Amino acid sequence: MIGTGRSDVHVTITGLGAHVPERVVTNDELAQMVDTSDEWIIERTGIRERRIAADSEALSDLSVPAAQQALEQAGVDAKDVDLLIVATVTPDMMFPSTAAILADRLGARDAAAYDLSAGCTGFMYALAQGYGMVAGGLSRKALVVGGDVLSRILDWSDRSTVVLFGDGAGAVVLEPTAEAGFLAFELGADGAGGEHLWLPGSGSRKFEDPDRFVKMNGREVFKFATRVLVQSAEAVLDRYQARVEDVDVYVPHQANVRIIDHATKKLGIPSERVVINVDRYGNTSSGSIPLALADALADGRLAPGSLVLMTGMGAGLTWGSALMRWTIGTTA
Ligand SMILES: CC(C)(COP(=O)(O)OP(=O)(O)OC[C@H]1O[C@@H](n2cnc3c(N)ncnc32)[C@H](O)[C@@H]1OP(=O)(O)O)[C@@H](O)C(=O)NCCC(=O)NCCS
């Protein structure tokens, strides 16, 4: 459980970008592949459609446009980025890292670049690392990317997983700021629950029956998700001594509308303050929170001064929250 930094240096998001593949896959299309229906998927998950990468698209291809938008908004030249973290479980390949590939494609010469694996919570972990590096003076301009092409590791004949996920990526630039920005973090992991959402056979552990696809115990993950979304949000608010009523914009991981509704009600956050886009993108794993931030910035809900609460959860099992005072966009 990692907590709030003690640094006097404030750190904020100065640029934000997001990108999804062009191809939309509707629930009706999935119903032609597996035994499911539009009604079942909407009722149990709230998902109506998702984006799926073309055969020629890898994670770095989705990340380049997202990163370029973020750099442009921040007014930062790629060559000045000194740290590049990509949070993902679907890198282009095991090595070189997607971060190194991305640094090369963006022209971020000499930036330290590495991938980070924390399941769907990856973006929250990477944000905390970027914050720590900038607050500690190791980095001046950090680019943090969260994204996944989960469609590559799904069993397209398994109706229990294939309906949930989609592909997408988001990026933020982190820089020191005079005030505001990140206020507190809370991260954690429970490896004992790892087998509820995993990809056995994808690394150095030998399995008798290796599997190339995601395996999930949906009910267990559902229970875990509803519990940690609430606990982690309460912990991060408590750390900054903020109240739920103070939160202007709540950005939960976009896994399932029922999970989000449960957390929202339990926390007591009014529904108009909750960002939801899982209906259009499904669960994009590490792309989920930056994609939702980009939506909220575009529709004017995120404005300078907004108190923003973000909470992710996913494979590991992992979870992570951040509380921040937003600093970019137009004041309403
Ligand atoms: C997967 C999930 C949507 C299933 O919803 P649920 O309401 O719990 O459904 P259940 O697992 O109880 O299954 C109910 C029935 O629907 C069936 N079912 C499962 N997937 C189905 C689908 N796509 N279409 C139709 N029926 C389906 C099940 O086989 C089961 O049938 P049975 O009663 O005959 O055994 C839900 O558990 C969930 O969202 N879990 C969290 C998953 C998640 O977020 N993972 C990523 C975390 S980062």
Image (cartoon, rainbow, N blue to C red):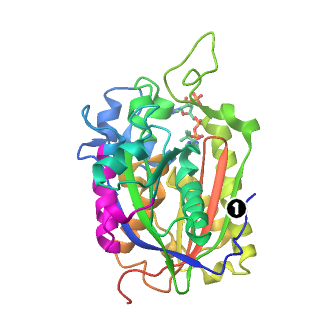
Main SS of the magenta part reads: helix
The answer to whether residue 243 is above or below residue 217 is: below
Q: Amino acid at mark 1?
A: Ser
Q: With 172 as the anchor, is 73 left or right in this view?
A: left
Q: Which residues are magenta?
A: 61-82
The answer to whether residue 201 is above or below residue 83 is: above
Residue drawn at 54 percent across, 24 percent down? 202
Between 100 and 253, the one lying in front of the other is 100
| Residue that numbered label 1 is attached to | 232
Residue drawn at 44 percent across, 39 percent down? 97
Residue 167 on the magenta span? no
> Where is residue 191, by image quadrant?
top right
Between 259 and 86, the one lying in front of the other is 86
Report x, y in % for residue 26.
30, 42
Report x, y in % for residue 42.
43, 47
Q: With 35 as the anchor, is 52 left or right in this view?
A: left
Between 85 and 226, the one lying in front of the other is 85
The answer to whether residue 66 is above or below residue 62 is: below
Residue 68 on the magenta span? yes
Asked whether residue 19 is in view, the answer is yes
